[in-house]
Image (cartoon, rainbow, N blue to C red):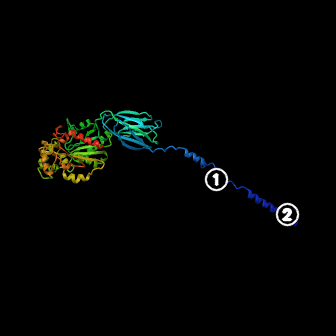
Amino acid sequence: MNTMRVLALMLLLTLSACDEQSATNTPPPEQDLYPELEENDDTQLPPSELDEEVDEEQELPPPDCELPLAQREQALSFSPQSQRYALERCEELRLRFVAVAGQQLSIAFRFAPSEDADARGVALALAYPTDEPWSQALLSEISVSSSKATVVDWVAPRGGEFIIALRALEPRVPVHFELALECMSKCEQSATRYPILLVHGWTGWDSIGPYQYFFRVPEHLREGGAEAHVASLDPYNSVTVRAEQLAQQIDALLAEQHAQKLNIIAHSQGGLDARRAISALGYGDRIGALVTISTPHRGTPLSDVALGILPGEAQEALSFLLNLLGAIAVGSESDALASFGSLTEAWVQQEFNPQHPDDPRVSYLSYAGRCCATGEGCGDLCDVEIQFTHHLLQALAGDNDGVVPVSSAVWGEYLGEIPADHFDQVGQLAGVTGPNFNHLEFYQSVKMLLVERGF
């Protein structure tokens, strides 16, 4: 019996050892190499080393450009020789040039020799600088994709600035090209970049019948290629009132001419009107240059005497001025007095000038006129009509033109004296001036100065 128990015990021990050995030899359960991937997950497995090598060999396309494209401006001058340009990636190039009204131009475009014209293309449009070239073009948009030169003839509708806009049809890739702008007619003429606005002073008018304030000046400037216009302000009123009128006419002319800015050439009180429009009314961003001619930037003692502020023959001076300006004849005595009040030395120096600082965006240029009682020593004999006031001012303020002292006319960059009294400076009366001064040639020289300085 004991023997049977021993045998049974030995059998149980043997079976237990076999189970342990079987458990030891059982392979471990399969591990999930990517535990983050669940069943039916669309996420792709990491690429193999071979896939990475293939991706590195593939050239990725350039990223898309942000719209609108970055704009770059550059000046363009007339020349029969082509100039090379580059359209950088994601860029629009705008070439600025100035033309005369009615001038015929030839625009020649071709791709640089290194460019594959079949793989490149450029869109070209011509427009006013204030307009969107791709929707308001003066010359319909042209697409160029041939290696041959493309030539376009065009006539300028007005004098002044224009732009040629260019952009690549595939803006993500840089393009190199050559372009020439050649003058075909009126090449001896020249226009200012911005239109010219002539602003009159006391008693000013645009025209009365055949007579103009700036006698034949606008026509002469246009004949030389400039875009010239004349403001029409109250002939007798304060600077405050006239500046408001001037601002409205600036806006109208800018819109009419599709221009970004104007150049103002102002005579006498017109210079103060323009300074107020620029400074107090915020027109500094719309004026390129202000040229003043015998403007009383520090007032004129003539107004002080006429209003009784300075001692002198006040009533005689006032009556003389009112008759000279024609104010009595047209019933504008009160407006003329307001104008005189805007030109006194105290008001201009103590109130107007401190309240109207120069705008750094505007170029200020000035001329002074001068005449003499005998005509000797200064190059001009004062007209009979203003010899009385010239004598009065000579005693009070020194050299003058019969209305404004030379010292008061200096403002900004002073360009010197001209041998002309206050009337000769605008070609009055009826174009008759002193023998040493040609007012038409003078205004033409002012225009050429603006052209040379890029205005």
Viewer-side residue, 53 vs 254: 53
The kind of residue tagged 2 is Leu
Q: Residue 87 or 303: which is nearer the viewer? A: 87
Counting residues from the N terminus, which is met first, the one under dot 1 or under dot 2? Answer: 2
Residue 220 in view here: yes
Can you give x and y, in whole percent of width and height, for residue 314 in the image? 12, 50
- The residue lying toward the viewer, choosing from 267 and 433, is 433
Distance between the Cα atoms at labels 1 and 2?
49 Å
Numbered tag placed on residue 356 in the rendering = none
Residue at the limit of the structure toward the bottom, as seen here: 2
Residue 220 is situated, as x and y percent measured from the top left of the image, at 24, 36
Mark 2 lies on a secondary structure that is helix
> Decide: marks 1, 2 in contact (CB < 8 A)?
no
The reply, left or right, for residue 86 in relation to residue 375 is right
Return the residue nearer the eye: 329 or 162.
Answer: 162
Using a 10 Å C-alpha cutoff, classify the residue at mark 2 as few (fewer than 14 neighbours), some (14 to 19) or many (20 or more): few
Q: Where's the N terminus, which quadrant?
A: bottom right
Q: Would you identify the image quadrant in which residue 122 lies? A: top left
Badge 1 local density, few (<14 within 10 Å), some, or many (20+)?
few
Place of residue 272 in the rendered image (x, y in percent of width and height, measured from the top left): 23, 47
Residue at 46 percent of width and 44 percent of height: 65
Per the image, label 1 sits on a secondary structure element best described as: loop
What residue is disc 1 on? 33
Q: Is residue 16 above or below residue 292?
A: below
Residue type, label 1: Leu
In percent of width and height, residue 209 lies at 20, 35
**Where on the picture, by quarter, is residue 103?**
top left
Residue topped by disc 2: 7
